[in-house]
Image: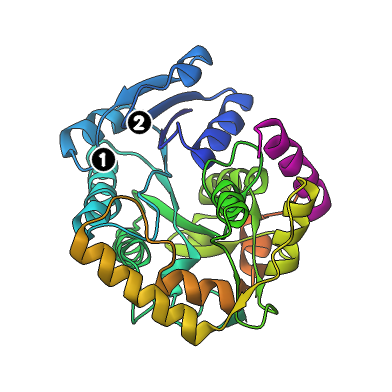
């Protein structure tokens, strides 16, 4: 098949492309910058902005399937900086797929679409979309996912995946930022330190994307128009998990604590200061991050296992070994 991957130069997108190439598919990628590593593998690369409808239209032309992985992630930034790539970009992808007769679309979403400031302890896809948003990323991804799934039809079958806290070799964001924050002394244990969270090994997440593509072909009436949570299927105790990684890399474990109410208040103050002064970079703490670091957020993945055939081929022990080895090689 001919398959487009938006954000193919990114972390998850790169792993999805590897899986597609292993299957012998012709792959095209679209991203904001040049991707010579992908071109060296035989991937056709288009440079452009997802918010530019003409660029997306050209990228979707002639494709049999699309993986829409690209998004602006993060906890800080203007509304428009998230809305344009995440909402407008997704609208452009759906419109281009319809215009060019693309039959299958797999969308990379996030569990943050159900964020509601409360602990989430094993709930499934029956959860409603979130409210009381504390970051534009979660809010815009929820808008995009809801609109995208409503566009599902017999002509364009769509599935959304919600992988949580993706980690693994090549991780450019999650664990490197945690480690840098911990080593610099900025990171503290928020709350009582007992929260449990889902994490997702990137190779398993990529497999889930291919599972979704296959399911859209094999049993479209069962899976199309649905969203699925994706994770390792075994929530970890967040702070012991982080400390294990830190100590494995030769760093001191985290011991200092801050209560959630205090962390939430500090986050609110820092957001105000950063917003008024227009400082560059992210605040050291935000209200969204404070909640996520203190409360449970793990999900039921039985639907993905049952309906998509999703399996965690790489278990937690192997995933951590591969990840820590990679972080060590990269100097973390």
> Compared with residue 31, is residue 45 higher up or lower down, i.e. above or below?
above
> Compared with residue 25, is residue 241 higher up or lower down, i.e. above or below?
below
Which range of residues does the magenta coloring cover? 315-332
Q: Residue at x 52, y 39 (%)?
A: 11
> Compared with residue 218, is residue 257 higher up or lower down, i.e. above or below?
below
Q: Is residue 183 magenta?
A: no
Q: Between disc 1 and disc 2, whose residue precedes?
A: 2
Which of the numbered marks, if any, corresponds to residue 5?
A: none
Question: Residue 109 at x, y = what percent?
Answer: 44, 57
Horizontal side of residue 99 vs 321, given as left or right: left
Question: Residue 216 at x, y = what percent?
Answer: 51, 50
Report if residue 238 is visible in the image. Answer: yes
Horizontal side of residue 7 vs 150, given as left or right: right
In which quadrant of the rendered view does residue 328 lie? top right
Q: Main secondary structure of the magenta part?
A: helix
Question: Residue 74 at x, y = what percent?
Answer: 40, 55
Most foreground residue, 62 or 172: 172
Question: Residue 35 at x, y = what percent?
Answer: 42, 22
Q: Is residue 327 magenta?
A: yes
Residue bearing mark 2: 30
- Contact, CB < 8 Å: mark 1 with mark 2? yes
Q: What colouring does the structure picture have?
A: rainbow
Q: Residue at x 53, y 42 (%)?
A: 12
Residue bearing mark 1: 50
Label 1 crowd bin: few (<14), some (14–19), many (20+), radius 10 Å: many
Report if residue 237 is visible in the image. Answer: no
Q: Residue at x 44, y 80 (%)?
A: 264
């Amino acid at each position: 098949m001919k398959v487009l991957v938006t954000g193919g130069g990114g972390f998850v997108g790169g792993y999805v492309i590897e899986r597609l190439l292993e299957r012998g598919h012709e792959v095209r990628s679209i991203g904001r910058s040049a991707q010579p590593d992908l071109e060296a593998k035989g991937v056709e690369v288009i440079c452009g902005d997802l918010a530019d409808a003409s660029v997306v239209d050209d990228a979707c032309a002639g494709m049999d399937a699309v993986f829409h992985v690209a998004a602006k992630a993060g906890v800080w930034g203007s509304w428009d900086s998230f809305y344009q790539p995440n909402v407008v970009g997704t609208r452009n992808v759906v419109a281009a797929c319809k215009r060019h007769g693309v039959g299958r679309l797999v969308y990379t979403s996030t569990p943050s679409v159900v964020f509601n400031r409360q602990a989430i302890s094993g709930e499934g896809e029956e959860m409603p979309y979130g409210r009381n948003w504390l970051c534009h990323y979660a809010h815009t991804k929820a808008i995009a996912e809801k609109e995208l799934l409503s566009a599902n039809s017999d002509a364009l079958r769509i599935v959304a995946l919600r992988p949580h806290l993706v980690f693994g070799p090549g991780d450019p964001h999650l664990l490197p930022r945690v480690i840098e924050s911990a080593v610099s002394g900025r990171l503290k244990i928020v709350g009582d330190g007992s929260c449990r969270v889902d994490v997702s090994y990137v190779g398993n997440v990529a497999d889930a994307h291919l599972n979704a593509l296959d399911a859209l072909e094999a049993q479209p009436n069962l899976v199309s128009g649905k969203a699925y949570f994706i994770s390792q299927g075994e929530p970890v105790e967040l702070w012991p998990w982080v400390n294990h990684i830190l100590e494995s890399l030769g760093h001191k474990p985290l011991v200092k604590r801050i209560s959630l109410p205090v962390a939430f208040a500090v986050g609110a103050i820092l957001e105000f200061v950063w917003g008024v002064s227009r400082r560059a970079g992210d605040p050291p703490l935000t209200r969204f991050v404070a909640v996520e670091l203190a409360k449970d957020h793990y999900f039921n993945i039985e639907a993905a296992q049952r309906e998509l055939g999703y399996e965690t081929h790489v278990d937690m022990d192997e995933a951590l070994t591969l990840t820590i080895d990679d972080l060590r090689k990269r100097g973390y």
